[in-house]
Amino acid sequence: MDTMMGLINLEHEHDFLNELTYFRCGAAVPFAGRFRLIDFTLSNMAKSDIHEIAIFTRSKYRSLMDHLGSGSDWDLDRRHGGLFILPPDWNDPTDISKGDLRYFHNNRDYFLRGKSDYVLISGSQFISTTVYHELFQHHLTKGADVTLLTTTYDQLLPEHDACVKVKTDADGWVSSLANEPKNSHVFTGVYVIRKSLLLDLVDDCIANYKNHFFMDGIKANLNQLNVQSYHYDGYSAIINSIDSYYRQNLALLETDAYKDLFFKGEHVLTKIGNQAPTKYLEKSKVSKSLVATGCVIDGEVDNSILFRGVKVSEGAVIKNSIVMQRCNIESGAVLENVILDKDVTITRGQELKGAKEQPFVVAKRRKI
Amino acid sequence: MDTMMGLINLEHEHDFLNELTYFRCGAAVPFAGRFRLIDFTLSNMAKSDIHEIAIFTRSKYRSLMDHLGSGSDWDLDRRHGGLFILPPDWNDPTDISKGDLRYFHNNRDYFLRGKSDYVLISGSQFISTTVYHELFQHHLTKGADVTLLTTTYDQLLPEHDACVKVKTDADGWVSSLANEPKNSHVFTGVYVIRKSLLLDLVDDCIANYKNHFFMDGIKANLNQLNVQSYHYDGYSAIINSIDSYYRQNLALLETDAYKDLFFKGEHVLTKIGNQAPTKYLEKSKVSKSLVATGCVIDGEVDNSILFRGVKVSEGAVIKNSIVMQRCNIESGAVLENVILDKDVTITRGQELKGAKEQPFVVAKRRKI
Amino acid sequence: MKKECVTMLLAGGVGKRLGALTTSVAKPAVPFGGRYRIIDFALSNCLNSRMYTVGVLTQYSPLDLHQHIGVGKPWDLDRMNDGLTILSPPFTVQTGGNWYLGTADAITKNMNFIDRYDPEYLLVISGDHIYHMDYDKLLRHHKEKQADATISVLEVPWKETSRFGILNTTDDLRIYEFEEKPAQPKSNLASMGIYIFNWKVLRDYLEKDALLSESEHDFGQNILPAMIADNLKLYAYRFQGYWKDVGTIESYWEAHMDLLKEDLELSLNNTNWRTYSHDSNFPPQLIEETASVAHSLVNNGCVVSGTLNHSILFENVRIDKGSTIKQSILHPGVRVGKNVYLEKVIAQENIFIPDNTRISASMDQEPIVLSQENLKAITS
Amino acid sequence: MKKECVTMLLAGGVGKRLGALTTSVAKPAVPFGGRYRIIDFALSNCLNSRMYTVGVLTQYSPLDLHQHIGVGKPWDLDRMNDGLTILSPPFTVQTGGNWYLGTADAITKNMNFIDRYDPEYLLVISGDHIYHMDYDKLLRHHKEKQADATISVLEVPWKETSRFGILNTTDDLRIYEFEEKPAQPKSNLASMGIYIFNWKVLRDYLEKDALLSESEHDFGQNILPAMIADNLKLYAYRFQGYWKDVGTIESYWEAHMDLLKEDLELSLNNTNWRTYSHDSNFPPQLIEETASVAHSLVNNGCVVSGTLNHSILFENVRIDKGSTIKQSILHPGVRVGKNVYLEKVIAQENIFIPDNTRISASMDQEPIVLSQENLKAITS
């Protein structure tokens, strides 16, 4: 049976989330009440019968490692295969590779050892709940060299500016990859490639002093390669800025979006926290909010997202805000258009207010 | 119940094994036919009811990560606790810590989060098969600040030169830690310390620009601390040079040493390879040798160690040598006083001969 | 491989008095507290007390229970050389399965499992109580007293003593008498069904007891009285804290209402004594604009558009607009339509309650347990 | 959760003809090949064929078997939502355990387990054969033929056909007749007891068959003939490679001697088709100065000072000086004293063979199986 190995390439994802990415990489940023960005792509892979997943990451990966643990929460704590965090280098003085090509170059044996002939590559910024079986089948049936997962957004948003846009012919063969502002046919960053071709392209890129596998190996060779597209039409979001992060979180408070993302596809696997169900006390007044477990709420919460273990005391008010794990909002505190990183305490009576266009972000473990 | 967390600190272990440590850290070097050096201390910890083990390591750790995997072979693939490879830094510009203190400093929350009040610290160069229950009990009973595991060697060998030597009073309280050449009472690098004291000493060391926790935090403060010793009298070896590595491997070919190390204490846990039993063919002539599984032998092997999956063809001769995983010794080849790293092929009729005092080392994947 | 202490968790209870809640699942597998099963409390106690060698004895309707326990991952009991082992009756006999005759018989039939670990001590617990307890403290107490057996006890109100097995002890808690449901109690120390034995001592008693045809092969009825008669050192260990036998519909409902109290000794939010369970990875709950939620526990995957008061929602429950849920317990996957009114109701897994349904029990009535079957009768 | 294909591994065999080897363990748990148990071959085939949803049906003496399989870690079958599940008879009935009446009955009694995964296909295999097989290829063949059932077959020598269930097929391998041990065979295609069914189709036949009091509730005897009679599409799938039923002492010994051949189709060293098993973490074997080892398989933890020829040593075996072992199989933990001579002997686990013992079977005799009991008789 033809199978795929997985690769989550974080090398070219910038630490775009300011305070939220001071001490963690973007892939490890909390999202939607109980997840981290990487959970979506990792779950999709795990549910697509991909049992061998490598992650390319250079720095600030400890919170990622903490989150992933042995991989057991994604059923990836395997004796054969499993989850591999691959470092970029080897202290090899003869190594001339650059960018993400260093990872490919220095972990060549990882790819060779794997039994799969195909590699599914993804970043962490495309949020969806799906499985990749049909994408893979499409790739095999079309006999493509590379197949890109693409989608279309009715409304182009600022976060789509940075995406590669796709033009295809009637059969789905890709004719152009460019940063066209008005093209709503977006490459999601997810693609399938034959392993042997991948390694050949890597060698080519390194020999020519390149530094970006997708841009230099695939996009630049679009004429020589048979690149297919496979269209994904489920719910999805792209998160690559504070603005898109804030907006796409709050977008899930609309019932339809919530159900489309979480109840149409597969369940998103994440680190199990073993929190108790959330406890609503006498004075709690919660509306249009996403609330994780382990919270104890005696205040007012509106149009907001509470992560695990948040405490909202009597008389506190939270509006249009994202409050991460174990924050403690003391009585009388008022938050509006705010993002609190985890373990923040907002003391009694304190008021914080950001703008809808620019939420006020508080770094973790602060007491204000 | 009082419990310990484990720490394997590789920061101050040099890459002493020349060719064998070009691409791996010393802790990951193969030993005794099927193990890696780190297996001994890791197994001892795992069998001592230590369920949370951190490893401090900076570079060349990929083969270590490959070896450890999810930790399942040591029963450390746990949801609560488990195995943590901790990086030294955090891209924190205000960080002034140095040496192994950077790890302690930047992973302070790891220690705080652990539920154990005591930490067992070890390197990877002390080879023994034991459990630390009695050491821990001794530490608690004596009410010591720190308890060092010590041992005595009848004959001082070159590898003991680099060790810290210990003097104690009649009650086992340590009065001196020094590099005395003739003192045969050796500190093994294994010790127990109260977590809160550990963190206090770390802060002290950092404030004073120190760079070595044991030397600067414990040895230098010997007068202020109550340091106990606990004497280990089972079989053990210290490996910190090519010479000691070679000698201590071959020492296990003596039946008594073999049985003392492997059959008196606990089984040493290691990565499971799922090799078939070793197959001896018609012409095989093996004597005084340690042979792992998965080998196919049709030649002559004497006073040597064969790791997993080694092939020895008809007419090949191996003497006083260490041959690592998956080496292929073609027919008529002759090896004497040689160490072959893994995946080496010795072609038909080739002869290699090193000296007993300086074995000839061949780096991995070479074909000669 | 030798282990100091082996734990045997008796999870074979039929739970007849829980009525409809146990028609298809064993009592230990009954959902509890918004995200747990009853047995999670005992299993989590094992993990938190570092009791890692656990045999779980099942017999009645074990499919759901086995599926829930699996290989023990949530409790970190999927271990190489010990961990959790499910012991079904056929483990023990070559002639087909037999029900266990009593609590002691259940241990006797699994002696070969216990002997594999050659333990000093055997801890016996049951899988159908709600409590947090550090079994390691019990074990240390047992060792300090150099006891042959130690029984965990709870002070119960004197008027309730007749419902329990009562232990009569000297001042230093040495047990000289065991009375099952005494009419004239001399003590209010009730046995919690949690025992530690010196395994060698117990083993002898079990072997002797197995030969007695008139014995019920029960710890309380036979083994403990025999030990007391032989003047062995039996001690009581005083447990303090919340402990509830959820053996009836009423007590099951009461225990849930207890959880809504703010000052309960047992806290599900206690990070030093977590209760572990499976997690189906539902997304966080969505509380809609029209919702009003107070005095309630709500789990992941719920979507609430109605009013909740003094109620517990397990995962993936939906409450539509205009509905009011009071003093009720809704098991996983329950769907409540529009303008429904429920009061003092326990709705079982995956039930769909149609629009405009009104079901309520009055304060002095037993809660109404809804199943797919009786729902039709009630609403038609 | 839906799975395309569920595998049911029948591991309940008694293995009577293996005599002393199965007095205390089920046939699938009998040691094989120096480090395996017989069932490891089927389980490793599952892993290598990516068949991850496996029910293992045990009944006879399952303790060792359960302990060996554990939670399925060595085969990577300790998974969250599927993986390996041990199904003991009491999973199925509320009235106590019952033996399975036949192979089909074993499946019938576990329908609720299978239905949990709502599979398209059911793969049925047994745990007592030695072979490497890619079940995924079988499944693809089944799908290509759009069959209702596919049976894996092996060409056997014509003179041996009377020992097997023989399938008579048309040229394109469609089965039109099944003959159990025919005297006048029309074909030499023997059933290997490995089936793939469309689960919905099989389910109907099983339900009907369960009601027939005269049925043996066996696939070969009842289900397949009924399907053929109804003109369903049954196809044979030709297996090529080494396959051995180690059902007798003689064939068990022969299969071991096969392993010593250099050109055997089945190689334990095949890195593309590994056979997985437990590993007790013994150190590498020590071959001493006085040893002579040829034509043998030796596992970890052995210390050999004597002479080995055409023999298999499981882990942790000791052979002292002056002893000679020929054509023998020594199970884990066997200790052989000085100046012992063994030929064509199978020594069971942990036996100690005293100095100067001589035991041999001649070439035309069945191998001698040594147990702790008969050893005393033989050597006294």
Image: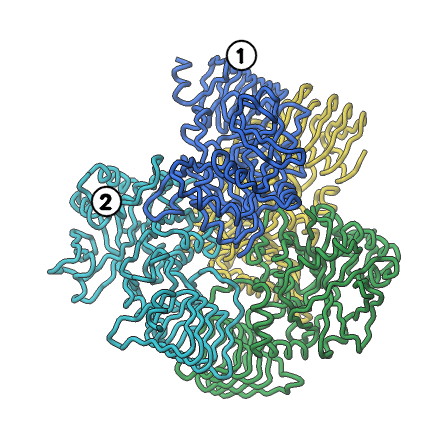
Chain colours: A green, B yellow, C cyan, D blue
Q: Read off the residue under disc 2.
A: C217
Q: 10 Å neighbourhood of mark 1: few (<14), some, or many (≥20)?
A: few
Which residue in the rendered view is the most extreme toward the front? D230
In this picture, residue C344 sits left or right of residue D171: left
Residue A273 pos. (x, y %): 50, 64
Q: Residue at x 43, y 47 (%)?
A: B171
* Count of labels in the image: 2
Chain that bears disc 1: D
Question: In the drawing, does residue D297 fall left or right of residue A8?
Answer: left
Q: Is residue D53 or residue C283 the one in the foreground? A: D53
Tell me residue A368's x, y (percent): 55, 82
Vertical comparison of B2 with C318: above or below: above
Q: Provide residue C37's location: percent of width, then percent of height.
A: 39, 61
Residue D341 visible in the snapshot = yes
The quarter of the displayed image where residue D211 is located = top left
The amino acid sitting under disc 2 is His
Circle 2 crowding by C-alpha within 10 Å: few under 14, some 14–19, many from 20: many
Frontmost residue, D34 versus D206? D206
Q: Does A243 appear above or below D14? A: below
SS under mark 2: loop
- Which label is found at residue D364? 1
Reply above or below: C98 against B259.
below
Residue located at (19% from left, 43% from top): C215
Name the amino acid type tagged 1: Asp
Q: Chain under label 2?
A: C
